[in-house]
Image (cartoon, rainbow, N blue to C red):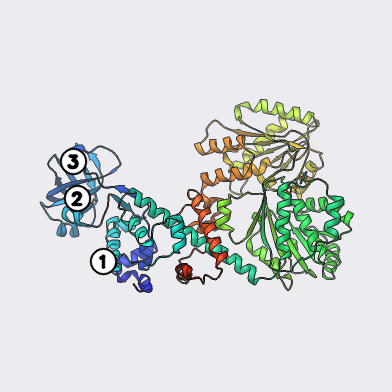
Amino acid sequence: MNPNFLQTPIDYLKGVGPNRADLLKKELGIHTFQDLLNLYPNRYLDRTKYYKITQLQQSSAEVQVIGKITHIKTVEQKRGKRLVATFRDETGVMELVWFRGHKWIRENLKLNTPYVVFGKTNFFNGTFSMPHPEMELLKDHENSLRSAMQPVYPNTEKLSKSGITNKVINTLLQQLFAETKNNFAESLSQPILQSLKLLPKNEALLNIHFPQNTEMLARAQYRLKFEELFYIQLQLLRKNMIHKAKIKGYPFVQVGDYFNTFFSKHLPFNLTEAQKRVIKEIRADLGSNAQMNRLLQGDVGSGKTIVAFMSILLALDNGFQASLMAPTEILSVQHYNSLLELCNKLKISVSLLTGSSNASQRKEIHQNLENGELQLLIGTHALLEDKVKFKNLGLAIIDEQHRFGVAQRSKMWHKNKLPPHVLVMTATPIPRTLAMSVYGDLDISIIDELPPGRKEITTVHRYDANRLKVFRFLRDEIEKGRQVYIVYPLIQESEALDYKDLMDGYESIVRDFPQPKYQISIVHGKMKAADKDFEMDRFVRGETQIMVATTVIEVGVNVPNASVMVIESAERFGLSQLHQLRGRVGRGAEQSYCILMTSHKLSADAKTRLQTMVHTSDGFEISEVDLKLRGPGDIMGTQQSGVLNLRIADIVKDSEILKLARSYALQTLKADPKLEQPQNQSIKQTYAELVKFKNIWNYIS
Ligand code: ADP
Ligand code: MG
């Protein structure tokens, strides 16, 4: 078969006229023969069973019945007419009903001829009726290329109404298989097929559309899922390899005085094994002459900052400047304060640049950056302003990646001749399988171990009715000198209700924790930035014992003395948010607590979220549950959900196949980066076609 045959416009398939072609394109995105072939069924119905009319039950299941039409009549009703056919088998009588398309049906239906009808039934006035049944002459039914498992294709209301039923799609596929003689080019290599005992492409396609039996169907599905994921991974890995081959970076070949002195004299603690491993990974990247593009994932408190700092030292050791950017002013100030001391010990010049830096500070920073005297610049988005020009930026670190877009990331690249190495740090763990498919072109490092001696945060779930007890507990903790967060769901402009909740809550807290004994800060999204910072500062300095807030405090703040996190209406928060919030406590030496307050009315999902929080503090475990509850689109944010528009595989359910596909894609590319070996020609060909015909998922910008 000519390989371009499958690219034939769908209009040319027998049975597809201009109208149907239009619908198929608009409703299902089917433009070519290939698209039709790749329209995989959503589910399969068991059509081995035939019901007698007297066996019919009142249920919503679809059933099939063999019988003959003995009579057709038109019934006038208030709005329009309906066509009613009397349908009989040897046990009884039922009705077939149409509300549309009367003319066609009247002209085409054969009386007193055996039909198989299929559909849902209604029961009214002692009679079963089947509206808009799928119908087939019994003799065609017996001869057709069909199997026990009847495929159900993704279909839209509009398509059925316009006459493109499931059966029509099935017929079109039969036509396509007849025209191609089921002779499709193999798209995987023989070694892969053999090693995994996968069905050949021909058999897989045949069985996905016309399953011989359940076993063959399962094998067909497995093969096609593997193939889909394999090509996604192949694409991501190739991007990564091309990036490494093409985008040169500054090689930081030497580990010099800064790094060595710090390591031997000033390291404030022993690194965890995970930190050591990650630093090694980063060192290897920085030492090669390809630009590093690495994502560092690690739970809150896992110690990412020291890893960042040691990477910075490697840049400085090689005569380059470095930058560290955080999403908020508070966070950048915190980074600055915690690194200042270390920098002073090593005599490294460091500055802080934020929106609040004044003109003369800015001027000095700009100057010293350009003449190279300033080695490390820490700050907010302000770092991205055009006036900020480094003499030789070698490493750009971005903390809390989810707040910055890709555009901003790449903006930092264009500050000097070669792009700086980029390290993106995030405390929002992304399930490995998802990271593999979405960030496949970034390298990923994971800190999956907390520093030793960290006390596990005690997490409990309490109902609102127990509020007084909870307040008593808070008083005890404050008595011991601790500080407390009380968090309410996010206030959005339109959500007057949230604001009222927060204010009601605040008032009751003020009542139960009276001044002057208790001082309370409040921070929410409707406040001006300066007011927020002022309130936050009071809490950071320990002037207030209670911080009442909306989720604005989610990212970053570090108040080691805060040991209790109360989350109000916890059922309204997503898992990753709950986990982030909980990460605000447990940063000091004291035992810390997280109290999840809810009403008694909880959905099943909410219960699962709360139980997960109570039972584990492992961010990766939590993110896996989150992925199962919400699905990948929601987790990545809607803008990226297109990423996961898979035809047949499911990132969550098929994570094992995904891992396998990735490892085979990696092996293939490692052994044969340009896909030149004879056994890889089928892969090369398929990949080229996927790219050429834009069938390949357009993942990452
Ligand atoms: P995050 O990953 O959330 O940015 P940080 O880097 O802020 O975490 O580290 C959290 C706290 O743990 C800091 O106070 C830091 O000094 C401390 N820390 C980091 N690594 C270690 C370690 N290996 N041993 C002991 N304490 C550590
Ligand atoms: Mg941090």
Q: Does residue 204 appear to the left or right of 426 in the view shown?
A: left
Disc 2 residue lies near ligand 1 with CB under 8 A: no
Give amino acid for label 3: Lys
Can I make out residue 334 in this image? yes
Q: Are marks 3 and 1 in contact (CB under 8 Å)?
A: no
Question: How far apart, in angstroms, are the residues tagged by discs 2 and 1?
Answer: 22 Å
Q: Are marks 2 and 1 in contact (CB under 8 Å)?
A: no
Residue nearer the viewer, 520 or 396: 396
Can you identify the residue that label 2 sits on?
Answer: 116
Q: Is residue 522 above or below residue 528?
A: above
Mark carried by residue 241: none
Per the image, the residue denoted by label 1 is 15
Of callouts 3 and 2, which one flags the residue occurring earlier in the amino acid sequence?
Answer: 3
Instruction: Determine which quarter of the picture holds residue 269.
Output: top right
Q: CA distance from mark 3 to mark 1?
A: 33 Å
Position of 4 relative to 314 (above/below): below
| Residue 579 position in % (x across, y down) | 64, 42
Give the secondary structure at mark 3: loop
Q: What residue is at 61 percent from the left and 42 percent from the top?
A: 498
Q: Amino acid at mark 2?
A: Val
Left or right of residue 455: residue 178: left
Residue 397 seen by the camera: no
Q: Tell me which numbered mark, 2 or 1, is placed earlier along the sequence.
A: 1
Residue 378, given in percent of the width and then of the height, sits at: 78, 58
Are the residues at dot 3 and dot 2 in contact (C-beta closer than 8 Å)?
Answer: no
